[in-house]
């Protein structure tokens, strides 16, 4: 249904932008065919790999498709704005077109530039973002403890081995005690992504590199991928925990399966299983890819780290993303006595690689003892 839903902006552009232009019929037909072709990006993805989530075109083609798709989306938004303004001001003007040809050309130029900027922002190597989180009853030995969160890498034909290597180098340079990866590491099969995930083997932290699956791991052979991640040195925390120790103090790091697991033939998130046998009284850091169940997790954890939303990708879309994720879209939230930190994501799904005002991030989180 992706390609059908995303046809709607294109149809609006055809009807309200292209048809009124003073072009020849042949030119309009050619431009309309190109627009329709670009709007079906997700259908071509599925034909290229069998999955809408994993385009297997050359990187340049994936970038071009995202730029063209973004141009259509932004042009539809701008055209709607022009139509609304034109209709609202029509009674106060002499009889004239609702939108002038000059305004249409300006909207088209603006849309192409915005799309280019959005694709660049989405595909660049993220900068580090520093976040401090105060935790009640955090043992003094863990005050100042640093962990790096990577999430939503979406290693694919868009985010390839060179990008992954740069991310690993930046993560390692942050001198963290611990690295966690909170799901959606890949888009594609183990064989298709073999070279792209190889740099993950170089992630280093004294207390280890730990990961949980996101929904996309279940779309491409969950068992195979979890085995492969283990071979790369990423330790899985699916419905289980590990205990971090410092100077006799303890901190629990627990992880959950993704909410989409049952629909793909696997066990869903089980907080009781994840915390079974955990030391009583030790603060809990919980890893869960999707944030929507944070209110249910709050009585059992002190800090939850999540991804999945990509921060809303484009400023203004966060409202709609939050509605689909129980009110959560980007950044830190206080949920009862728990802090939820929701990363914008390190990468992005290659089927919608657009960012404006919601930059990607490699997050360094420093724990502090709450007063």
Image: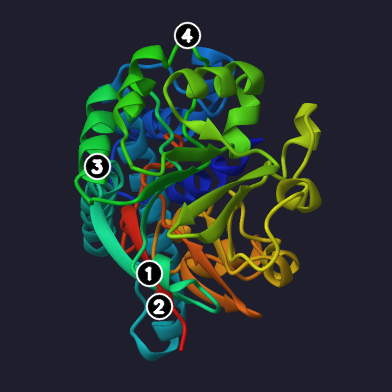
**Mark 1–mark 3 contact, CB under 8 Å?**
no
Q: Disc 2 designates what residue?
A: 85
How far across and down, in percent of the image, does residue 279 sit? 68, 58
Circles 2 and 1, Cβ within 8 Å, touching? The answer is yes
10 Å neighbourhood of mark 3: few (<14), some, or many (≥20)? some
For the residues labelled 1 and 3, the Cα–Cα distance comes to: 48 Å
- In what element is the residue under mark 3? helix
Q: Position of residue 93 (x, y in %)?
A: 34, 86
Q: Which mark is residue 172?
A: 3
- Residue 26, quarter of the rendered image: top left
Residue 50, by quadrant, is top right
**Residue shown at 42% from the left, 82% from the top:** 90
SS under mark 4: loop
Labelled disc at residue 323: none
Q: Where is mark 1, residue-wise?
A: 82
Q: Is residue 87 above or below residue 328?
A: below
Residue pointed to by mark 4: 191
Give the label, 1 or 3, closer to the camera. Answer: 3
- Picture coordinates of residue 141 (x, y %)? 41, 67
Give the CA separation, mark 3 to mark 2.
Answer: 51 Å
């Amino acid at each position: 249904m992706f390609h059908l839903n995303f046809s709607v902006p294109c149809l609006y552009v055809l009807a309200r932008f292209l048809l009124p232009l003073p072009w020849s019929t042949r030119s309009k037909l050619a431009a309309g065919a190109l627009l329709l072709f670009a709007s079906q990006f997700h259908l071509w993805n599925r034909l290229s790999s069998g999955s809408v989530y994993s385009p297997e075109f050359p990187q340049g083609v994936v970038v071009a498709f995202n730029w063209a798709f973004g141009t259509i989306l932004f042009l539809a938004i701008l055209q709607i704005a022009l139509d609304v303004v034109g209709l609202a001001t029509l009674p106060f003007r002499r009889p004239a077109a609702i939108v002038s040809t000059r305004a249409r050309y300006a909207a088209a130029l603006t849309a192409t530039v915005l799309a280019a900027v959005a694709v660049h922002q989405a595909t660049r190597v993220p900068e580090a973002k520093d976040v401090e989180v105060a935790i009640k009853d955090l043992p003094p030995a863990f005050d100042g403890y640093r962990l790096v969160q990577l999430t939503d890498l979406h290693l694919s034909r868009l985010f390839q081995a060179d990008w992954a290597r740069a991310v690993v180098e930046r993560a390692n340079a942050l001198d963290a005690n611990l690295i966690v990866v909170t799901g959606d590491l890949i888009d594609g099969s183990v064989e298709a992504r073999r070279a792209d995930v190889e740099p993950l083997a170089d992630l280093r932290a004294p207390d280890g590199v730990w990961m949980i699956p996101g929904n996309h791991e279940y779309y491409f052979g969950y068992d195979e991928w979890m085995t492969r991640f283990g071979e790369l040195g990423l330790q899985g925390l699916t419905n289980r925990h590990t205990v971090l120790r410092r100077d006799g103090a303890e901190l629990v790091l627990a992880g959950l399966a993704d909410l989409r697991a049952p629909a793909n033939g696997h066990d869903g998130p089980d907080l009781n299983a994840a915390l079974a046998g955990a030391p009583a009284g030790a603060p809990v850091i919980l890893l869960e890819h999707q944030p929507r169940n944070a209110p249910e997790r709050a009585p059992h954890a002190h800090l939850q780290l999540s991804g999945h939303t990509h921060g809303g990708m484009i400023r203004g879309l966060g409202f709609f993303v939050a509605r689909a994720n129980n009110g959560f879209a980007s950044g830190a939230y206080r949920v009862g006595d728990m802090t939820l930190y929701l990363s914008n994501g390190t990468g992005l799904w290659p089927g919608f690689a657009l960012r404006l005002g919601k930059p990607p991030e490699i997050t360094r989180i420093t724990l502090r003892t709450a007063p």
